[in-house]
Image (tube, rainbow, N blue to C red):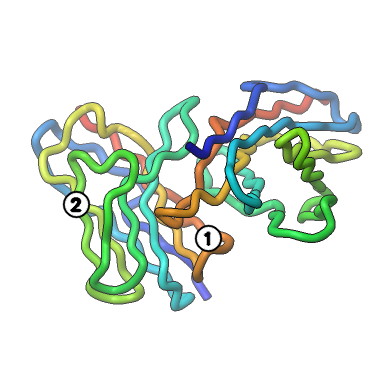
Amino acid sequence: NAGVTQTPKFRILKIGQSMTLQCTQDMNHNYMYWYRQDPGMGLKLIYYSVGAGITDKGEVPNGYNVSRSTTEDFPLRLELAAPSQTSVYFCASSQDYNEQFFGPGTRLTVL
Amino acid sequence: AQSVTQPDIHITVSEGASLELRCNYSYGATPYLFWYVQSPGQGLQLLLKYFSGDTLVQGIKGFEAEFKRSQSSFNLRKPSVHWSDAAEYFCAVFGGSQGNLIFGKGTKLSVKP
């Protein structure tokens, strides 16, 4: 099992550009999450999904969108990148309310 | 609201010394508690978790944590620190309504030779 994979590892965007952060898990987990990590702030939940076709907002959803068309994939979309979205993004998955498995992260810089 | 507090932002210990990282939580029901470790430039790896039962939990890499309900604490310990333990450590509680983890702000551990 590869676990949770994320692409790309690094990305630099210009203000106003858009991009999609990819996340795939091969553990057949129902639950998937997107977090952002800012220095000294821990991880904050952006969006989450409890299964294919079901998504909901977390603590900091503004400026982001998600979709969940399959169990495996949970992409995060940034439509109009802003400097405030410079962060490290982590995708995670879990089966029911249990341990969450994290991907390696995507480091995004918006200039 | 649920929350997690890690009072120490940065701790430095000598290699071979013992370690204790503090974690306090606020949660109405019986908490599900986790400790994760993040090495520089890496994702988060689970060290250990507490759901119920024995309040002293053993994890990977020689770490253990003790759940103390009366103190709302879940402190992480290691008897003898190795240089490879230098990393950032996050305590988390399962938040419930959104199925997500609520993280503390992390404690960065440096290890002196």
Left or right of B105? Residue A68 is left
Q: Mark 2 vs mark 1: which is more N-terminal?
A: 2
Total labels: the figure holds 2
Q: What kind of residue is marked 1?
A: Phe
Q: Which residue is mark 1?
A: A101
Q: Observer-nearest residue: B50 or A22?
A: B50
Q: Residue at x 26, y 34 (%)?
A: A85
Q: Regarding mark 1 in the picture, which secondary structure is present there?
A: strand
The chain letter for the residue carrying disc 2 is A
Do the residues at pointers 2 and 1 share their chain? yes
Left or right of A52? Residue B57 is right
Label 2, label 1: how many angstroms apart (C-alpha)? 21 Å
Residue B92 position in % (x across, y down): 58, 44
The chain letter for the residue carrying disc 1 is A
* A72 versus B28 height, above or below: below
Q: Residue at x 78, y 37 (%)?
A: B70
Residue B19 position in % (x across, y down): 83, 32
* Residue positioned most to the front: B28
Q: Which residue is mark 2?
A: A65
Q: What kind of residue is marked 2?
A: Asn
